[in-house]
């Protein structure tokens, strides 16, 4: 009788093991739909918008960088006063971290910070200019430049 009980338990154990191993935890169809869903979020299909990469960090041109400009209009102590605006263009490209970030010809604007005509008695003329903005791709960027 003990042998019959052990034999029955062994048969039941084998049947449970076979039944347990034949089932999968996730049906194949649902795995494919899960992969299709995750793939569709990574790649835009027809009629879907593409994932937009994050914006590039701003480019910083280091302090002490020399900006060589060509004056686009004449400026003189005879015709200009402090506060007058002038237009200029970069004569040479400007690089940052080995990449050209401002091409030659980039438009610049500035102001006359000091204008004194030459006097007959008190010496020579003084004309001090300072750049205050650059225009790149139609967008104006303020800059802090030393007067010249």
Image (spheres, rainbow, N blue to C red):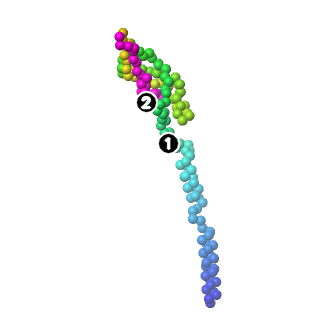
Tell me, yes or no, if residue 138 can be seen here. Answer: no
**Mark 2 → mark 1, Cα distance in angstroms:** 25 Å
Compare residues 18 and 119 and report the one nearer the observer.
119
Pointer 2 residue: 143
Tell me the crowding category of disc 2: few under 14, some 14 to 19, or many 20 or more residues within 10 angstroms, Cα based: some
Q: Residue at x 49, y 22 (%)?
A: 69
Provide the residue span drawn in magenta.
121-148
In the rendered image, residue 79, in percent from the top left (x then y), is placed at 38, 13
Residue at left offset 40%, top offset 18%: 127
Residue assigned mark 1:
54
Name the foreground residue: 29 vs 86: 86
Do the numbered discs 2 and 1 sit on residues whose CB atoms are within 8 Å? no
Image spot of residue 122 (x, y percent): 35, 13
Residue 25 position, x and y percent, is: 57, 65
Q: Position of residue 123 (x, y in %)?
A: 38, 13
- Identify the element where label 2 is drawn: loop
Q: Looking at the picture, tell me which residue is in the foreground, 5 or 126.
A: 126
């Amino acid at each position: 009788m003990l042998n019959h009980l052990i034999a029955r338990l062994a048969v039941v154990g084998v049947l449970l093991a076979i039944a347990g191993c034949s089932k999968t935890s996730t049906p194949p169809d649902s795995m494919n739909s899960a992969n299709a869903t995750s793939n569709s979020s990574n790649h835009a299909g027809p009629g879907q918008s593409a994932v937009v990469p994050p914006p590039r960090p701003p480019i910083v041109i280091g302090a002490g960088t020399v900006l060589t400009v060509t004056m686009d209009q004449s400026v003189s102590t005879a015709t200009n006063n402090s506060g007058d605006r002038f237009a200029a263009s970069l004569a040479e490209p400007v690089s940052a971290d080995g990449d050209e970030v401002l091409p030659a010809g980039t438009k610049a604007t500035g102001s006359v910070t000091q204008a004194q005509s030459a006097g007959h008695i008190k010496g020579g003329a003084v004309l001090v200019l300072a750049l205050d903005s650059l225009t790149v791709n139609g967008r104006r960027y303020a800059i802090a430049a030393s007067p010249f």
